[in-house]
Amino acid sequence: MKLSTEYSPVEVEDKWYAHWEAKGYFHSEPDEREAFSVVIPPPNVTGMLHMGHMLNNTIQDILIRKAKLDGKNACWVPGTDHASIATEAKVVRMLREQGIKKSDLTREGFLEHAWEWKEKYGGIILQQLRKLGASCDWDRTAFTMDEERSKAVMQVFVDLYNKGKLYRGLRMVNWDPEAKTVLSNEEVLYKDEQSHIYHVRYQIEGSEDFVTIATTRPETILGDSAIAVHPDDSRYTFLHGKRAIVPLVNRSIPIIFDEYVEREFGTGALKVTPAHDVNDYEIGKRHELEVIEVLNDDGTINENGGLAHYVGKSRFKVRTEIVKELESSGNLVEIKPYAHNVGRSERTNAVVEPKLSLQWYVDMKSLAEPALEAVMTDEVEFFPKNQKNVYKHWMENIRDWCISRQLWWGHQIPAWYYEDEVFVATTAEEALYQARAKTGNHELEISDLRQDEDVLDTWFSSWLWPMSVFDEFSTKEEIDYYYPTSVLVTGWDIIFLWVARMIMAGYEWKHERPFKHVYFTGMVRDQKRRKMSKQLGNSPDALELISQFGADGVRYGMLSSSPAGGDLLFDEKLVDQGKKFCNKLWNALRMFKNLEIDDSLETPIENKLAIEWFEQKKSAILNDLASNFDQYRLSEALVSLYSFVWTDFCSWYLEMVKPDYEKPIDSYTYEKSMDLFEDLCLMLHPFMPFITEEIWHKLKDRKEGEDCMNGSWPKATSYDKEIIAKVEKAKDVISRVREIRNKNGIKKNEPLSVLVEESKGAQDLLAVNGVKEILIKLAVLSGIEWVSGEPEKSVGFLSGTEKYYVEIEQEIDVEAEKEKLEKDLAHAEGFVNSVEKKLSNERFVNNAPEAVVAMEHKKLADGKERVRIIKASLEKL
């Protein structure tokens, strides 16, 4: 078989993905096997593949492919989220470019355009995930606004309402003036920003006295209802019963006393604007203040402020102008620079305004208790564990969830109004039935009812995702088989927005956890630890990376630098390393496929040892991998596999079994090597599926359907530590000989003679069948002889506590040899000190297993022997 000199992912990846899909390997149906189910965190329907998606979906694909190899019925459900705010903004922008304003359209007309946009662009990211190798069950692709998911949303809304866990109330909300909708607290991002604080004086009514307040938002002066001071603030006791005049507006407002006021902040006097500040609203309720709303939904000033020349202007333009007017009127005392926390919309980046609004809310306290207990008791287990503390803090301080949004794209709230009554039902017909029953008016028609104009928060559909994708609200077979799902892979940044809410929903409607484990990925950052973003220009094009380095190379690069829960410091060098790893595997295949096989040849003794050593080492690695997979230490798993394949297989095993130049290989060695290479493909497949599938089919003749993806994970068995240790010692001796060869300029193919000082350790090593032959072959030796002392014209070295000598003809550099031995001595003495320190720790000695303490004593004895030998060698120089 003639193979190309370099692995070409472009030719391989599309071929194998199409093959897997055609074979139906991604599809799952309930059967007798153990289910392993994963639901994709649905990307926004507006989304394009970025680095965060690549990390998250690579991890999910690894877990799914590993589960398949373990013989489980793996089901990975894909889908997209309708993303109300982001999608509506995209559609509005598209229509604007066509000369159409949203305000010119009816709701139905706008939704026609929105659905057209969704059908055209909404599935792009799912197509892109195929390039990454994502083995999703595409037959199950769901959308949060499709018929099944929408039905579930309606049922849940009605159920919560009927249980008294959902209500409509007038409360302060976070308002996005750009998207013109309310936001939940979790959709507001706060950060310190440089601004100004303005000191403004208000005249005391009926006097020449003034009181000065400090504000960061002078435009809200137009909505002031009072001035508040602390009741114990002696500076202001004379203001009892007095009123003040709002500057420019000339409105008379009361001066009130309230303990909320911080005497140390600003001037100690607080302007109270109940319609535009959460805390002011609470003060207003306590003192029955007038609520004056001066901002329109788009952030412009309305006529309620009383100054006509500001009406229709943006809040920030008015801020600039009102400061000038306050200054010219003599009411501006001073302006100071001021840094404070500013809330911005997660979606539009607009500065969020507090706004009094009638909205729908979920009573979260009634849902939180079982969801908190589930995580604290590890019924829902978090990886890494530190996220439990974050979750606990949020759940213990949970606030009601505002679920209504002032948009058209989304699930329209299933509430209908007639006069002053509200009727909540899954359909208009059911609402009409309720209305006729309540009013006694059987002449009512659907047209007499008015459906709520708002839509539900997008998260109100995605919190049902683990249930709704398996049709919990329609059928039973699938939900009973696949639920609870096995693991959720997501970012820690949506632990409140999504993870906590899914857990609450699971216990509310299924009375059990929605998933067994939650694996939190870190954030993808650049080498300067900055979050990757289009704005910073530090985020590579995901598809371009795949095109340049191959999907396997990209997957390797992402995973090898991604510790569980820790941030991923992305470096393109790691992706390139992944590409080189693919080539390394490819070249190992080429080496075998270029060999001639001779069935008549006896298997060399060194090959038998090499095969036994590698099989034992493979079992050790499989045991480590099992532990790493159990704890979701996927980065550690991949790094150990990389070392095992690159170093143990390619650098050592192949050298041990490779025949001399242009010589044939015996059939036993060849077949066993193919078996071992096959196992490596299976072990690497979850991480690097394309290269492993390609090599798998070139290793042996395969039957129809005998694919790597469809194979079985190699069995981890007990392993012989002695065999592994002996060959590792032999490798160390070979490395030392090669080092001496290089330092003394001796050619690679020039045979050297090695002499071994007689000791039990050396005798035990060389007594192992095949060790001597491996040493001679890989170190290129003319022979190995025993000696009782240090021979002349030789360079000595230690391997463990055994002393070896390499005979050389060149003059030995005594100073260089002395310097090397002194370095070895410092290292050996440091090792002895560290072991002695550990053994002097009573807690360690008393609590550690007996075998562990015994091992430390052995290390100490070996270390001291090594120190003795090095010192003896130094004395002879």
Image (cartoon, rainbow, N blue to C red):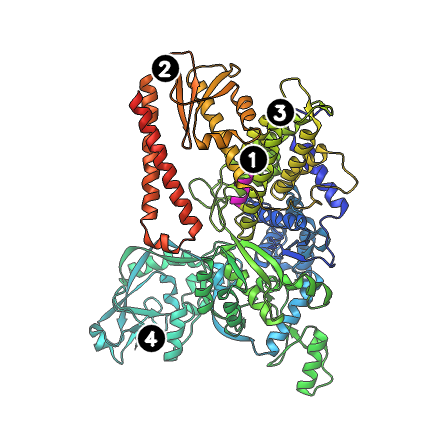
Q: Earlier in the sequence, mark 1 or mark 2?
A: 1
How many residues crowd around disc 1 within 10 Å: few (fewer than 14), some, or many (20 or more)? many
Task: For mark 3, give the secondary structure.
Answer: loop
The amino acid type of the residue labelled 1 equals Gly
Q: Nearer the viewer, residue 299 or 91?
A: 91
The residues tagged by marks 1 and 4 sit, at their Cα atoms, a distance apart of 70 Å
Contact between marks 1 and 2 (CB within 8 A): the answer is: no
Residue 210 visible? The answer is: yes
Is residue 643 highlighted in magenta?
Answer: yes
Which residue corresponds to the image point at 55% horizontal and 43% vertical from the top-left? 620
Question: What residue is shown with label 1?
Answer: 578
Task: For mark 1, give the secondary structure.
Answer: helix
Q: Give coordinates of residue 142: x percent, y percent.
A: 68, 57
**From the image, which quarter does the N terminus lie in?**
top right
Label for residue 817?
none
Contact between marks 4 and 2 (CB within 8 A): the answer is: no
The amino acid type of the residue labelled 3 equals Lys
Can you tell which of label 1 and label 2 is closer to the viewer? 2
**From the image, which quarter does the C terminus lie in?**
top left
Q: Main secondary structure of the magenta part?
A: helix
Question: What residue is shown with label 4?
Answer: 253
Q: Is residue 672 above or below residue 743?
A: below
The residues tagged by marks 4 and 2 sit, at their Cα atoms, a distance apart of 99 Å
Question: What residue is shown with label 3?
Answer: 658
Q: Give coordinates of residue 667: x percent, y percent.
A: 71, 28
The residues tagged by marks 3 and 2 sit, at their Cα atoms, a distance apart of 34 Å
